[in-house]
Amino acid sequence: MPAASLPAPTVIQNTDPVPGHRPPAAVLVIYTGGTVGMEYNKRGELVPMKFEQIRKKMPELRQLNMNLSVLSLPEAIDSSNVVPADWLLLARIIGENYAHYDGFVVLHGTDTMAYSAAALSYLLENLGKPVIFTGAQVPVGRIRTDARRNLITALDIAAARHSMAGTVRVPEVCVFFNDLLIRGNRAKKVESEQYNAFRSENYPPLARAGIEVAFNDKQILLLPGGPLRVHQRLDDRVVLLKLFPGITERVVRAMLEIADLRGCVLETYGSGNAPTAPWFLGCLREAHERGVQLLNVSQCEEGRVIQGQYETSAHFAGLGIIGGDDITTEAAITKLMFVLGLQRSPAETARLLTYDLRGEITLA
């Protein structure tokens, strides 16, 4: 069945080129929903606004030397309702508009933004242009909103070029929030009441926004050697099993014995440690023998999984459990969906899960 046609972008700003200067950058804003695009109705309720009207809310956009277009999804999505099909749609939108824009800004709700940014990093192979996720903790219609600063800086970063070479500054999927630019598959939401909602504990920020945007060029991925490849398959037959003291065999079996299960992210303690109870190890062994890929990640925000450092993780290697190094849970679950969606052999799937695909892990 052919894919449904996508809505066409709406031009909201055209800047005439200055004679003798490089033409202004063209940036596509993709509005998915979320607090950043909300406004108050006459009853004082927050409702999604028509995002094409953003210039009325933010007249400062006219000061940006760039051509802006906006594409709104047919229906705004609360980020708590985001599903893998939405990630595939975003990847498709970027792929179909890739040749026409210098960068992309994705406006997204904060609750699942880290998952979406991680997923897009895998789906957009050989990405050579910025894809910057941002949003807001406070709607754009409020006086003390963070929406204006986040959107303006995200647009600035999406259009950024190296001054001498004129090449793309940030050819990555990123999250920009408050004053930090974070690699998308390293981001984690850590705050619900303050403006500094996102952090990257195991990898330094790619840029900090002060009076100027200071880029950390040494930490940014290099331009790819091949053309963009947009993947359009994810396998959602996965689960996330978070360990806790007192977890029972019944609970573990209920998750690992789900019919047709293909992968499990196992959130363990500390540096990858888990119970050594025979029933627990037996559950993992049986799952592995059924072909379930088991990816071990730490519940800690900082540090990494080092299987075998303690006796409580030494048994994992023999059970076919894959160490996730310093990957976040958000990046791990989306990586598992992506790699399983490639439909490779079990051995190749396991190898890819250990491989640094898009800068999501720091190999020791």
Image (cartoon, helix red, strand yellow):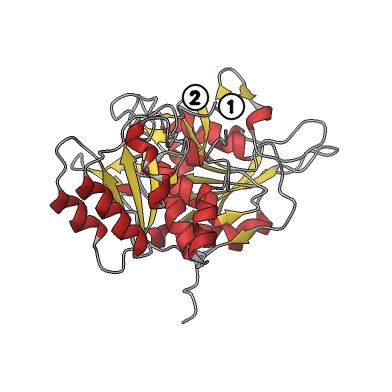
Q: Who is closer to the viewer here, 5 or 185? A: 185
Q: Who is closer to the viewer here, 191 or 276? A: 276
Disc 1 versus disc 2: nearer the observer: 1
Q: Who is closer to the viewer here, 165 or 50? A: 165
The residue under the point 68% across, 48% down is 128
Q: Earlier in the sequence, mark 1 or mark 2?
A: 2
What is the distance, in whole Å, between disc 1 and disc 2 at their CAs?
8 Å
Q: Residue 353's x, y, as percent?
A: 50, 51
Res 192 → quadrant: top left
Up the image or down, 27 lies above or below 93; here it is above
Q: Residues within 10 Å of mark 1 (few under 14, many from 20)?
A: many
Residue type at mark 1 is Ala
Could you tell me if the residues under marks 1 and 2 are in contact, i.e. CB atoms within 8 Å? no
The residue under the point 13% across, 53% down is 250
Disc assigned to residue 324: none
Up the image or down, 221 lies above or below 202; here it is below
Query: Which residue is labeled 1 in the image?
Result: 207
Q: Residue 336's x, y, as percent?
A: 43, 54
> How many discs mark residues in the rendered view?
2
Res 194 → quadrant: top left
Figure quadrant of the C terminus: top right
Residue type at mark 2 is Asp
Q: Residue 40's x, y, as percent?
A: 27, 40
Q: Viewed as shown, does residue 65 lie left or right of 183?
A: right
Up the image or down, 106 lies above or below 179; here it is below
Camera sees residue 53:
no
* SS under mark 1: strand
* SS under mark 2: loop
Query: Which residue is labeled 2 in the image?
Result: 179
Q: Residues within 10 Å of mark 2 (few under 14, many from 20)?
A: some
